[in-house]
Image (cartoon, rainbow, N blue to C red):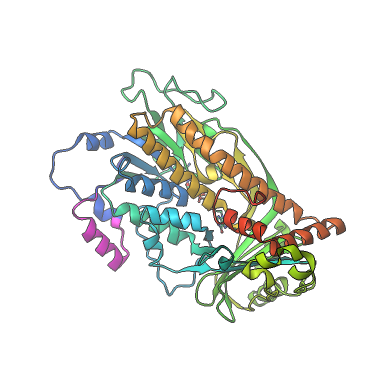
Amino acid sequence: MNRVIRRKFSANAHLLRSLGKAFCSDAAGRASSVNHGQPISEKENKQNSGQHDIAIVGGGMVGMALACSLARMPLTKHLNVAIIDGNPTLGRRECIKREDPPDPRVSTVTPATISLFKDIGAWQYVQQHRHAYFDMMQVWDYTGLGYTRYAARDVNKEFLGCVVENKVLHSSLFSCMQDTDFQNTIYPSRLTSMALPPSSSSAETDNVSSVTPSSKQGHSAKLELSDGSSLYAKLVVGADGAKSRVRELGGFKTTGWKYSQSAVICTVELAIESHCAWQRFLPTGPIALLPMGDKFSNIVWTMNPEESSTFKSMSEDDFVKAVNNALDYGYGPHPKSGLLSSEGVLPWRRGDLTTSANECFGVPPKVVKLASARMAFPLSLMHANQYASKRVVLVGDAAHTVHPLAGQGVNLGFGDAFTLSRIIAEGIAVGIDVGEISLLKKYEAERKPANVTMMAILDGFQKAYSVDFGPLNILRAAAFHGAQYIPQLKRSIISYASGEQRLPLFF
Ligand SMILES: Cc1cc2nc3c(=O)[nH]c(=O)nc-3n(C[C@H](O)[C@H](O)[C@H](O)COP(=O)(O)OP(=O)(O)OC[C@H]3O[C@@H](n4cnc5c(N)ncnc54)[C@H](O)[C@@H]3O)c2cc1C
């Protein structure tokens, strides 16, 4: 327990905030020494004994979103929460300088995510750092048979999404949580084992050891950490990513497969600033160019693993040439604007067209320079068959991983985190134990259909675009045209990709 960082923010929160902003220092370290000479409360006693209401295993973006949301809601802000993460930097305010080139690990956050961040007061922290809204998106493929342009104006919105560095999202959520009186304990260690009370059954198997009934923490799960310490919690949240230990120890089975694809990501500098998100489907997978503010853009280029090694190690000049080729004439011609125009194909829809329907195909701005290291990530699809068992629940990549082609992964995870915190609050309002299965199943019932639907759509896209076959190419072209010229379809695709739950085909 000596490595545990305890934080209790109250009257000194403002001072600590100012210090944190001025020096980007280890605010957690300072705060751990804050003690106001008050008698140790029952809550602090619980903390000292390692007893918590909730243990969040994994303090990544999704785990932190859950912690922040719990900290900000009136019904949950009194909870005593442990955050466990092997990352030693967790608990420090990260010093992110606006003038530094953006980190290549970024997320495209949807309007729905932005509005959830605003609800808990976290978006104002994101706005203090680099972030880039985009109001236009163009999608096309290498066959030259079609393209679709989406505009925020099509749905009377100001933007379609915002590209933010993962470290900015994470540190914004962390700062937002810190600037409250929330009682949280950070354990900078990895979860190694988990034992559930005897009455609990695991999700699908019985391979989880039990805590002795005589234990005073008999209604809690016992967690053991890599530094030898242990703690108890009424509810364990697995927010520990795609290789979740909580999922494994909780006996949750999964369905999924590896795509024989990797994503190469990096930051590049463009000749001119862009506010459009560009995505072109190539025979090997999609390449996306996402605005990052100023002339910076982020590249997410999906290809087979052998190619990813080559593209990662080739010279910077050759890589820049390859990117420009992939976003322009490489692999096939530009689609012709108006090949099947709105007037020719769907005359009955003419009066009702979206504003972007008559926009011409645009060529993305030229990349002039590589501005970060290149990184490669193997891609897979994975879904946990269940998200909840008694005292254990999964969120984010621990519950589901998706192909990054539509930038939805962490948005689904944020949806999980905010839904779970709301359902916990609802349970507390009526006096239900936070680890109660009936409560956790409500969360599962809400999130599973939403996640499965999105996963099926993304997987369908991945498969449809990984085959170069004449008739299928024509079908894809028809889909591009449908999305470009059928106004209701276009609007519902934009709404669905923005995080609204309605399916894109029902209009
Ligand atoms: C190339 C690429 C591009 C992407 N682009 C987008 C995008 O544009 N938009 C989008 O929405 N999504 C995107 N995603 C998906 C997104 O990055 C993930 O969905 C997101 O990072 C998942 O967050 P998480 O917090 O659930 O998991 P993670 O980020 O994996 O965090 C898990 C945390 O758990 C900790 N941990 C792991 N094991 C243990 C343990 N045993 N004990 C304690 N702690 C542990 C880790 O240290 C880590 O901090 C992309 C993914 C890839 C690969």
- Give the residue drawn at x 54%, y 60%: 108
Q: Is 145 a magenta residue? A: no
For the N terminus, the quadrant is: top left
121 vs 303, left or right, is left
Residue drawn at the location 60% of the way across and 33% of the way down: 253
Q: Residue 73 location in percent, x, y?
A: 33, 45
351 is higher (above) or lower (below) than 499: below
Closer to the camera, 234 or 72?
A: 72
From this view, report whether residue 342 is shown above or below residue 422.
below
Q: How many marks?
A: 0
The structure residue drawn at horizontal position 57% and vertical position 81%, both measured from the top left corner, is 272
In the rendered image, residue 22 lying in the magenta stretch gets the answer yes
Query: In the visual, does 127 lie left or right of 79?
Result: right
Which residue is nearer to you in this view: 248 or 404?
404
> Magenta stretch?
9-27
Seen in the picture, residue 337 relative to 199 is either above or below; the reply is: below
Residue shown at the point (56%, 45%) measured from the top left: 242
Task: Give the farthest residue toward the top.
Answer: 214
Give the image quarter of residue 227: top left
Q: Is residue 144 visible?
A: no
The percent coordinates of residue 33 (x first, y second) are 21, 50
x, y (%) of residue 325?
Answer: 72, 74
Most prominent secondary structure in the magenta stretch? helix
Q: Is residue 171 left or right of residue 109?
A: left
Q: Is residue 338 above or below residue 93?
A: below
Find residue 370 and report its horizontal and vertical position in percent. Answer: 59, 74
